[in-house]
Image: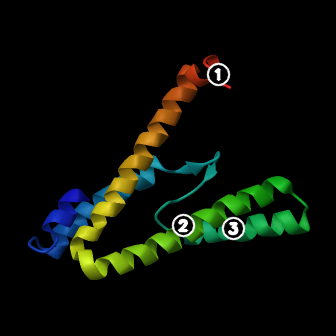
Amino acid sequence: MLIAGTFSSSWPNMLITGLLSMVAAAQLQEFRQLNGGPFTSLMMTGNLRTLAESIYDGVAGHDKQAVTKGLTIGTIILSFVAGAGVTALLTLTWHGHTIWLSAVILVITLIVSHLERRTKKSGWLSAHRFF
């Protein structure tokens, strides 16, 4: 993404699109689940279906877990919309370099995700309670 943002104005669009497709594939592979359930961070249609299902199960079936899942997915969808809006506004001034912000956010998310996995595997967090 950093390369795409740096060279987006001088490299052919097909090459930039190819680079971004590879990043999207890696992102899709890395972030496949959310709290043990299926999730996609690239396409919101599946998440909208999960939101609708969770709302229905929560309201019609009085399922508190479904309500919690619906709130989580709803937050993700709203975050996606907010990110798209901010990106659209930044594109007016940053142009192709706007993708750098997405790259930074994605790297931070990846680091936090790996740290959480490592912590869960090692049991370090449960063995070293601070509170």
Q: Which residue is more in the foreground, 87 or 63?
A: 87
Which quarter of the rendered picture does the N terminus lie within? Answer: bottom left
Amino acid tagged 2: Ser
Q: What element carries label 3?
A: helix
Mark 2 burial class by Cα count in 10 Å: few <14, some 14-19, many 20+: few
Circle number at residue 129: 1
Residue that lies at the very extreme toward the left in this rendered image: 10
Q: Which residue is more in the foreground, 102 or 11?
A: 102
Would you name the residue on which mark 2 appears? 79
Say which label, 2 or 1, has the lower sequence index. Answer: 2
Would you name the residue on which mark 3 appears? 51
Q: Which residue is drawn at 64% across and 22% down?
A: 129
Spatial distance from mark 3 to mark 2, Cα to Cα?
Answer: 14 Å
Q: Is mark 1 on a helix, strand or loop?
A: loop
Of circles 2 and 1, the one toward us is 1
Of circles 1 and 3, the one toward us is 1
Q: Residue at x 56, y 20 (%)?
A: 124
Residue that lies at the very extreme toward the bottom in this rendered image: 92
